[in-house]
Image (spheres, helix red, strand yellow):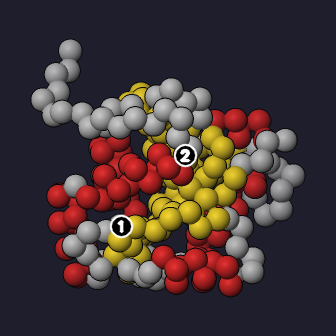
């Protein structure tokens, strides 16, 4: 029997959509003191490409949070591509997915940590949703891409996304990570059921 002395954080997601729930999770995640300190260090020294570290920290945070099924937090889940799509690999991995209690679907996240607003790379990740085999799309309704990058105003990001003609997703929100010069920006691509 495992006994945890840490108090679980309580969040209520009943009646909320994925974007609102994800926003609340990320606001609390990036507001926690140890995360702010680590991201300040990362930003001050100009480290980029820390996707695995971010994945581990978010996984730990989700395990310590109420209203998320701990046994349904999955890292690097594997999905088959539809072989009828152009230029497809056989398998695709999604960095992180989890299911909120009282919800039937998963929130799927791709993580990026870049030195700029890497819209082309985000776009490639969002295109994955179009290539996943239709029989495997029932587990989640959206693919979200979480991009940590140097701070930019939300209006500036929104304009850049609108000006990128071949962008295959939606700009959802951007959060300034407290005490740092970094932002966390979230994009989404809807999964269309066949």
Q: Residue at (66%, 44%) from the top-left corner?
A: 141
Q: Where 174 sits versus 24, above or below?
A: below
Q: Position of residue 164 (x, y in %)?
A: 69, 82
Q: Is residue 116 visible?
A: yes
Q: In the current view of this chain or complex, which residue is farthest to the front? A: 15
Q: Position of residue 89 (x, y in %)?
A: 71, 56
Nearer the observer, disc 2 or disc 1? 2
Query: Would residue 107 appear left or right of 114 to someone viewing this image?
Result: right
Q: Residue at (30%, 35%) from the top-left corner?
A: 10
Work out how far the residue at label 2 is from the one at label 1, CA to CA, in angstroms.
25 Å
Query: Would residue 173 appear left or right of 91 to someone viewing this image?
Result: left
Q: Residue at (38%, 54%) from the top-left corner?
A: 26
Give the numbered dot on residue 132: none
Label located before the other in sequence (2 or 1): 2
Out of 76 and 189, give the one closest to the viewer: 189
Rendering quarter of residue 144: bottom right
Q: Where 53 sits versus 61, above or below?
A: below
Q: Which residue is mark 1?
A: 50
- Say which element carries label 1: loop
- Say which element carries label 2: helix
Out of 185 and 82, give the one closest to the viewer: 185
Mark 2 crowdedness (10 Å alpha carbons): few <14, some 14-19, many ≥20: many
Q: Residue at (22%, 73%) from the top-left corner?
A: 179
Q: In the current view of this chain or complex, which residue is farthest to the left? A: 5
Q: Which residue is mark 2?
A: 18
Q: Position of residue 21 (x, y in %)?
A: 47, 46
Query: Would residue 111 appear left or right of 79 to someone viewing this image?
Result: left
Q: On the rendered image, what quadrant is the N terminus found in?
A: top left
Q: Is residue 81 visible?
A: no
């Amino acid at each position: 029997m495992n006994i945890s002395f840490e108090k679980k954080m309580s969040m209520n997601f009943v009646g909320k959509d994925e974007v609102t729930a994800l926003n609340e999770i990320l606001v609390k995640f990036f507001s926690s003191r140890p995360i702010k300190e680590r991201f300040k260090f990362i930003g001050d020294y100009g480290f980029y490409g820390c996707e695995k570290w971010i994945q581990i920290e978010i996984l730990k945070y989700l395990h310590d949070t109420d209203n998320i099924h701990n046994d349904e937090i999955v890292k690097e889940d594997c999905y088959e591509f539809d072989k009828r799509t152009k230029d497809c690999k056989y398998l695709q991995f999604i960095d992180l997915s989890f299911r909120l209690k009282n919800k039937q679907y998963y929130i799927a996240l791709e993580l990026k940590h870049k030195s700029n607003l890497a819209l082309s790379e985000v776009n490639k990740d969002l295109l994955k949703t179009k290539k996943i085999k239709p029989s495997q799309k029932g587990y989640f309704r959206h693919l979200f891409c979480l991009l940590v990058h140097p701070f930019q105003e939300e209006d500036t990001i929104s304009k850049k996304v609108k000006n990128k003609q071949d962008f295959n997703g939606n700009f959802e929100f951007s959060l300034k990570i407290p005490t740092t010069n970094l932002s966390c920006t979230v994009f989404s691509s809807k999964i269309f059921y066949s």
